[in-house]
Image: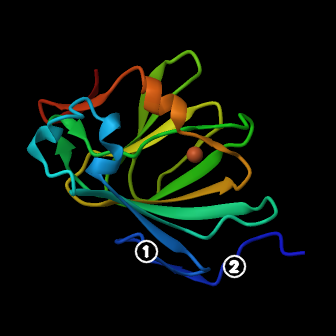
Amino acid sequence: MKTYPDLDININFRTGEIVGGGCLELARTLAEIRHIYKDSVELGGLEPTTPVYKTWAPPEPDEPALLYGTTLLLPGTVGDEYFMTRGHYHIKPGSGEFTVTLSGHGAAILMDKDRNTWWVEMKPGVATSVDGAIAHRAANIGDEPLVFLTCWMSDCGHDYDIIARMGFSQRLLKVGGNPTLV
Ligand SMILES: [Fe+2]
């Protein structure tokens, strides 16, 4: 029985691209994730077709397996709000994930079930881990693309819906040039 995905892969630390392993590339534009931003209507004057992030990951396996994937999150802001990923909880609270930053400068924005929000810095070589009960999203707080590698169990389940409806309790904004939770 094959338990783990094909690891005959090559990861580009600058672009996030994974070659091999049957990895699939998925791109997100502002139009697809506009609901997560404070300025979801005007988008800070940006075109809805503006690219925000790309991910690479292998297809979902038939049996539960340890999975991996990369994310390339471009630099930029929607008004004063950093480009960020959608964010989610895991449906299995005990099934978390591990992330290591490969390049760039970012923030892991985290929120517990009591809606306490905080963030931790992401920079090359720094690892973060969360359990599934902590909502998590990444923001690019630098001037270059942020690239990170994440590992998780394929059967952890992803709850994007509650974040889409309720958001995080605070937003990470660029205030006086510095990332600030507001
Ligand atoms: Fe996750």
Q: Nearer the viewer, residue 151 or 83?
A: 83
Q: Quadrant of the C terminus?
A: top left
Marked residue nearer the N-terminal end (1 or 2):
2
Circle 1/circle 2 CB separation < 8 Å: no
Q: Is residue 103 left or right of residue 131?
A: left
Residue pointed to by mark 2: 6
Label 1 within 8 A of ligand 1 by Cβ: no
Residue pointed to by mark 1: 17
Residue 70: x, y in percent?
A: 49, 63
Question: Can residue 102 be seen at all in this image of the molecule?
Answer: no
Tell me the SS state at disc 2: loop
Farthest-out residue, right:
1
Look at label 1 and name its amino acid.
Answer: Glu
Query: Neighbour class for label 1 at 10 Å: few (<14), some, many (≥20)?
Result: many
Spatial CA distance of label 1 from label 2 is: 16 Å
Label 2 within 8 A of ligand 1 by Cβ: no
Look at label 2 and name its amino acid.
Answer: Asp
Q: Is residue 35 left or right of residue 20?
A: left
Residue at the (61%, 63%) spot, across then down: 68
Query: Neighbour class for label 2 at 10 Å: few (<14), some, many (≥20)?
Result: few
Residue 168: x, y in percent?
A: 42, 26
